[in-house]
Image (cartoon, coloured by chain):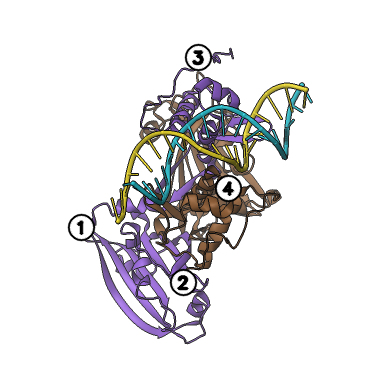
Chain colours: A purple, B brown, C yellow, D cyan
Amino acid sequence: MTQVTDDKMPVERIDRSAYEPAYVQLANILRRQIARGQFRPGDQLPSEAQLCRLYGVSPMTVRRSINLLADDDVISTAQGRGTFVKPVDLGTAAFHLYELQELFSNPDATRIKLLDVRILPASSRVARKLDLSLGDKCIYIRRLLLIGDEPAFYHREYLIYDPTRPIVEAEMEVTDLQGLFSEADSQVLKRGSLSIEAALLTAEEAEVLRAERPSAAFVLEHVFYDFDDRPVSWGWFVCRGEWLKFSTTVGIIG
Amino acid sequence: MTQVTDDKMPVERIDRSAYEPAYVQLANILRRQIARGQFRPGDQLPSEAQLCRLYGVSPMTVRRSINLLADDDVISTAQGRGTFVKPVDLGTAAFHLYELQELFSNPDATRIKLLDVRILPASSRVARKLDLSLGDKCIYIRRLLLIGDEPAFYHREYLIYDPTRPIVEAEMEVTDLQGLFSEADSQVLKRGSLSIEAALLTAEEAEVLRAERPSAAFVLEHVFYDFDDRPVSWGWFVCRGEWLKFSTTVGIIG
DNA sequence: AAGTGGTCTAGACCACTAT
DNA sequence: TAGTGGTCTAGACCACTTT
């Protein structure tokens, strides 16, 4: 490899009058250079001091650009050694739930059918999940989310039913997938833990979702907690496998 | 709510002699206050100037703390208005592929069995995916990843077979799930696009994975591209549903 | 010792929002 | 107009790695 770069002649310059801040511009310049193959995985980038001189910006600005690319897993930094281009790594891939929002792109076509609301005594399983005593009252809700006229998500949820705790009413909206568009804001919920797995539709689920059996499905389970770290809601969404496909990318996207 | 905070008396102070940098300490202080419920979703945080005075740090340092929390979707900022605590939002949830690494926690128990390697003419489907002409030569690989003695992942992959393109040899390792632990570093791969879905095991897959039918499975499909943005590999991992459960959290975890 | 990334300062100036 | 977040400077000092 011949040394093409020159301390006095960067190919692209930063436009100080542009709308984009300098640190974003510099990050994109570097990203493009990497995408072009000018820097390959494993290669070392110019040092931060060099980048300061090359592009006429201060150390803090260079640093922010570097951090942007590092957050994107495009480069990695090592104190005392330098900054290097990262190889493609499957492990950095992440599938985002907000992809679901595309499904609901047409709000008019989306509606929620309340199938069932009941107050019943907690089974041992529910009691364990909601940190209740066996037989304590809880609320059981079954909902169906339709897109067009097709049933898309089947949701079942158990909520605590405790007059001393200021919950329930608000939660019935929040834990709903609706919360994906209309930002439901609960003052009560502190956090939620979620998991997703692939499973077979049960007979009941297949009937509700108007699917044949056997059929594969995504199951998204959730538990929400209040600010005392006590669970207030446990439930799960079931969705036919064909309805859902999560996508993402790894490596340099520029 | 009575106003407990006072401009002159922050509850926690920043320890300048500590190992943790000041901006991390401040971010954690704020995160703990939010986790305690001192600031609720929708509440406005003290302004950056106030935080500077309260904790005796410069604007840039406060700003970095704020950005840390904003990246974690704990707070959101609005220019000219202020900084606010975000409500729990399902849409921010992300499932990370590196969770798979736990499956391979014991490297000795993990091994890869090469089932089949063949050179064959591209079918129309393969030609389309790899941007080849119908009938062009390509490499077909079938692998089985075992954990203990249990077959866990069944991987099938098509690779381009073109002597003029410097690939193949390296790829055979990189696109492998092995790349999750042993950081395989290809100089050739620029990016990959991934998708995941829930499906039923086919007869062949069930046999290879020693599973009954019907059975649900995760299918992770991948296409990798070189620095000319040409596809070099197309393939997919199949994994029995019971083997895999992705987990994550939303909201305040402190 | 020289070079690297990492933190931090004490301001300045700008853009935006509210009043 | 006053207050807010957002960008940027031109250094300083530190911790680490390499030679």
Res. B198 visible in picture: no
Which sits in the foreground, A89 or B195? A89
Q: Are marks 2 and 4 on the same chain?
A: yes
Circle 3: residue type: Met
Of circles 1 and 4, which is in front? 4
**Tag 1–tag 4 contact (CB < 8 Å):** no
Q: Position of residue A50 (x, y in %)?
A: 58, 22
The residue tagged 4 is B57
Q: To which quarter of the image does residue C15 belong?
A: top left
- For the residues marked 3 and 2, what is the alpha-carbon distance in whole angstroms? 60 Å
Give the residue at mark 3: A9
Labels 1 and 3 within one chain? yes
Mark 1 and mark 3 lie on one chain; the one further toward the N terminus is 3
- CB under 8 Å between discs 1 and 2: no
Task: Point out the image quarter for the C terminus of chain B.
Answer: bottom right
Pointer 1 local density, CA inside 10 Å: few below 14, some 14–19, many at least 20: few
Q: Observer-nearest residue: B4 or B167? A: B4
- Disc 2 marks which residue? B2
Q: Position of residue B215 (x, y in %)?
A: 46, 60
Residue at point 61% right, 35% down? Answer: A77
Separation (CA) of disc 1 from disc 2: 44 Å
Q: In the rendered image, which residue does mark 1 sit on?
A: A108
- What's the residue type where badge 2 is placed? Thr
Callout 4 amino acid: Val
Q: Residue at x 49, y 67 (%)?
A: B37
Q: Secondary structure at mark 1?
A: helix
Q: Nearer the viewer, residue A242 or B225?
A: B225
Chain letter of the residue beneath label 1 in the structure image: A
